[in-house]
Amino acid sequence: MTTQKPSIVLIHGAWHTTAAYRTLLDMLEARGYPTVAPELPSGAAETPPDPPEADIRCAAEAIRTLVEAPPQEGTGAGSGNQVIVIAHSYGGTVATEAVAGLGLRERQDRGLLGGVRMVIYVAAFVLQEGAYLDMYAPIETVPWCEYQGNLKVFSPGRDIGAVFYPDLAPEERDKWLARCTKHPKVCSFYTPKTTSYDRVDVAYVFCERDEAFPLAGQKAMVQGLKERGVQFREATLDSGHFPMLSMPEALANLVVQFIQH
């Protein structure tokens, strides 16, 4: 009997699509990990009436589909399906609630097989109950973006490429900026209705050169959760906000290390 590797669900961040994560996903697929990366509806051409809730439903459905799928042939009857979630940036807000009720230990307690084994946060917002993203990155302290109507937009005259991708070449910065989508303001003020990081294993990848969510903010947020008893496995990359673009192999290596150990 062969051992089935867990599937990976990637929850992407704001203003971006899964295209920015394709190289990382391909590297993980090449190592034998099936991957799924749903496109969050908040960035669609037609904004849903409840953007953050729609994102959470989308992510939860992608995870649930994998968890409840029949085991692949040759993996052993009733082996269950384990899932690893990778959450980047705003995707952390989404994943923290979407995973609730689908954790491996939670499902075992209910007599069910399979579930989410770990959430790996990458420069992500991991919100405590009662908190929201704008509390950790207040708009008045973030000079490169602003609120306009129902949207959170890039501030005119700012070098957004240097914010998101300081470790990419100028032409690569321009390429990914050209692919950016809109992002609803309400997503920055969403408070999780429930959390999951006290019921599944969690890891955090800090990004030292991050200009979008600076390292000090990442550290303070994680420390606040650790003081409440949440136990993180931690690693650090010498990257900007998008290590999946600037150093995908290093990030893939970390993901595999977290999974295997």
Image (cartoon, rainbow, N blue to C red):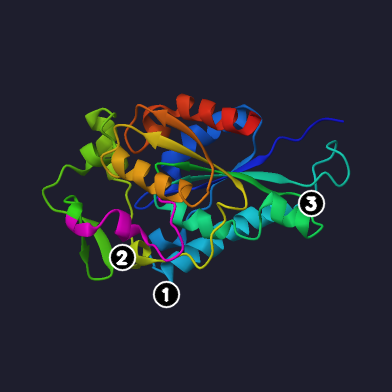
Name the quadrant containing residue 205.
top left
* Closer mark to the observer between disc 2 and disc 3: 3
The CA span between labels 2 and 1 is: 12 Å
Q: Is residue 68 above or below residue 179?
A: below
Regarding residue 96, the answer to whether it shows in the image is yes
Q: Is residue 51 above or below residue 175?
A: below
Looking at the image, residue 222 sits to the left or right of residue 194; the answer is: left
The answer to the question of whether label 2 and label 3 lie on touching residues, with beta carbons closer than 8 A, is no
Report which residue position mark 2 lands on: 185
The CA span between labels 3 and 1 is: 34 Å
Q: Is residue 209 above or below residue 132?
A: above
Pinpoint residue 161: horizontal percent, then vertical percent.
23, 39
- Tell me the kind of residue under disc 3: Leu
Q: Nearer the viewer, residue 146 or 129?
A: 129
Pinpoint residue 138: horizontal percent, then vertical percent.
25, 57
Residue interval drawn in magenta: 124-140
Report which residue position mark 3 lands on: 113
Pinpoint residue 48: horizontal percent, then vertical percent.
43, 70
Disc with the residue nearer the chain's start (3 vs 1): 1
